[in-house]
Image (tube, coloured by chain):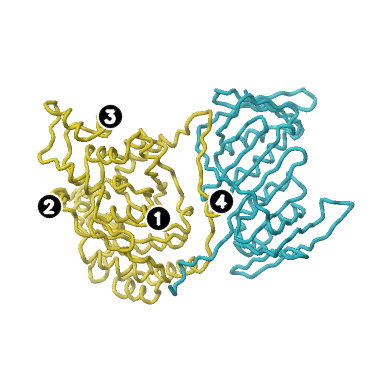
Chain colours: A cyan, B yellow
Amino acid sequence: MFEARLTQGVLLRKLLDSMKDLVQDANFDCSSTGFALQAMDSSHVSLIHMQLRSDGFDHFRCDRNLSMGVSLNNMAKILKCMGNDDVLTMKAEDQGDSVTFMFESANQERISDFELKLMDIDSEQLGIPDTDYSATVKMPSSEFARICKDLSTIGDTVLIAVTKDGVRFSTNGDIGSANVTVRSHSNVDKPEEQVVIDMQEPVALTFALRYLNSFAKATPLSNQVIISMSKELPVVVQYRMEDMGQISYYLAPKIEDEEMDGDE
Amino acid sequence: MGIKNLTKLLGDHAPGCCKEQKVENYFGRKVAVDASMHIYQFLVVVGRTGDQTLTSESGDVTSHLQGMFFRTAKMLEVGMKPVYVFDGKPPALKKEELSRRVERRGDATDLLTEAKEEGAEADVEKYSKRTVRVTAQHNEECRRLLRLMGVPVVEAPSEAEAQCAQMCKEGLVYGIASEDMDSLTFATPKLIRNLMKPQTQNVPINEYDYDKVLAGLNLTSDQFIDLCILCGCDYCGTIKGIGGVTALKLIQKHKRLEDVLTSMEGGRYEIPDPFPYEEARRLFKEPDVLKGDSMPQLKWTTADEEGLVQFLVGEKSFNEDRVRKAVQRVNAAKSKSTQGRLESFFGPVSVKTSDTGKRKEPATGKGKGGGAAKKGKSGVGLKKK
């Protein structure tokens, strides 16, 4: 039996909205430690790793580990039917073939039950090694979303270059080129607006903007985004939800192709 | 012509072995393509109405070049690296199957003349497809085209599928593009079907995983070969009354083809004479292929725009604009750096299955439905030469 109650039900809806564009079907892993998901897009370029800790829920019960196969799109559709202030309760039997979402309005006047059929799916998993990234940028999530959106009007890829005093996003395309530089600055009154750069060595990597724009769908989850990069490693774009958990997106960089070189 | 009914058998009994893929997901992948089979398909399908095919101004058939050029261009555009493998000398055992095909072609030619006289258009189309033959000239023109496009070509000593399978086993390519199910009998780790179908048909690409095939059918690789021989392959005749399901049951019960045949003695099944299963088994297990260092190095180079224009437009009456645009798209795609994949950083993928819920319908449903639909379309396509 799995049961989890979340006062801020809307959080799960935001999470689903930030994942459904990248992955169609995925397994949610329920265990005594929490509610988690790891999934890759079908081309294996990006990976989502989401974790909600059990102590972040108002009530959490999971008798035995359970892996629930879900169509993220359908789950998102159901969560759309939830009011913004509703309390959400998820329930699933160990041997059942469905999961129930119960929405209770804040004043307890309206209670709705939605049942979603589960699926048996094969999800592809990767073991992600612990890495000390050589550069970490913490910046307002809305700023990051805006940069990715703006640069997409010019090009398909973005070069993210981190130096000691700033991070530069640059792109070029058929119609022209664009550069956005964000300088590190602190703001004691409004910590959510600061830009903090922690760098061991400068890093510059190129990524497909299409994926970054999908990641930026998680902007409503957190005021700040943490971008971690190391030379020749996938970038991690992480959104932390206070007292609750986090969602991280991994994206493989663009690489120079040695075999296509016509001079061989 | 492959293994009889293997697609359906796999759809029913090993549904997990086949995965649907999109062309876009193959960026950066090296793929070995069974050239001879595809040339045949192009000749049958591309630009055909009735018994008329695409020709140049001087009347030479150009369907194969049309198909080969635009499909290869599409593959290069998404960043795939195709390598074409041509058939060499067919193994002696295949002679019988080949002579049967020649015979069928002969019959079809007669029927075609008949149909033409009667003016039955549907029949004209049907029979004229059956008379299609890939000539040495077709093959030679395709080689020339591929060289101009900067795509490597490999000459197999014998069967192209066996060579493709070997290249895939050695890790030279990610998978092999063929419609022929006997690629799996050659133990191809990854078989990609429908890769060369035009996008307008919107046929999903099916990727078969050899290990999952064996796991799904619960057979060893030797037993799988026996199963294929029993189902009916190119090298041996077929036993009347034995379909895929019966064959699978028999192999699962008796484990070895020898024992299956012994059990049939005196029964209602007629085993064709000769039934050279040992020889067929050897051909599947140790086919005549280039291995290791004897393989030429695979190189992809920039397409030669002027050369292609001269060949396709000058000699084969292609539309110059379309050729130039396709070449430019290909070369533009080549200059781009390619997208990396997470596996190359984080190691291999493991698969995790759900604890609850139903297996998604399309996975098995499409296996069956798709198999039946494909049969209709590629019934002709599967016969090669």
For the question of whether residue A70 can be seen, the reply is yes
Please name the amino acid that badge 2 sits on.
Gly
Please name the amino acid that badge 1 sits on.
Gly
- Which dot marks residue B257? none
For the question of whether residue B67 can be seen, the reply is no
Of labels 2 and 1, earlier in sequence is 2
The chain letter under disc 2 is B
Q: Which quarter of the figure has residue A96?
A: top right
The chain letter under disc 1 is B
Which class describes the residues within 10 Å of circle 2: few (<14), some (14-19), or many (20+)?
some
For label 4, the residue is B346
Helix, strand or loop status at disc 4: helix
User: Does label 2 lie on the same chain as label 4?
Assistant: yes
Query: Percent from the top left, x then y, of residue A65?
Result: 60, 29
For label 2, the residue is B106
* Separation of residues labelled 4 and 3 (CA atoms): 41 Å
Give the quadrant of the N terminus of chain A: top right
Helix, strand or loop status at disc 1: loop
The chain letter under disc 3 is B
Q: Would you place residue B362 above or below residue B343 in this image?
A: above
* Separation of residues labelled 1 and 3 (CA atoms): 33 Å
For label 1, the residue is B171
- Which dot marks residue B249? 3
Query: Percent from the top left, x then y, of residue A255?
Result: 55, 63
Instruction: Tell me the residue at 26%/42% (across/down).
Output: B3
Q: Nearer the viewer, mark 4 or mark 3?
A: 4
Q: Would you place residue A62 above or below residue A214 in this image?
A: above
Helix, strand or loop status at disc 3: helix
User: Does label 3 lie on the same chain as label 4?
Assistant: yes
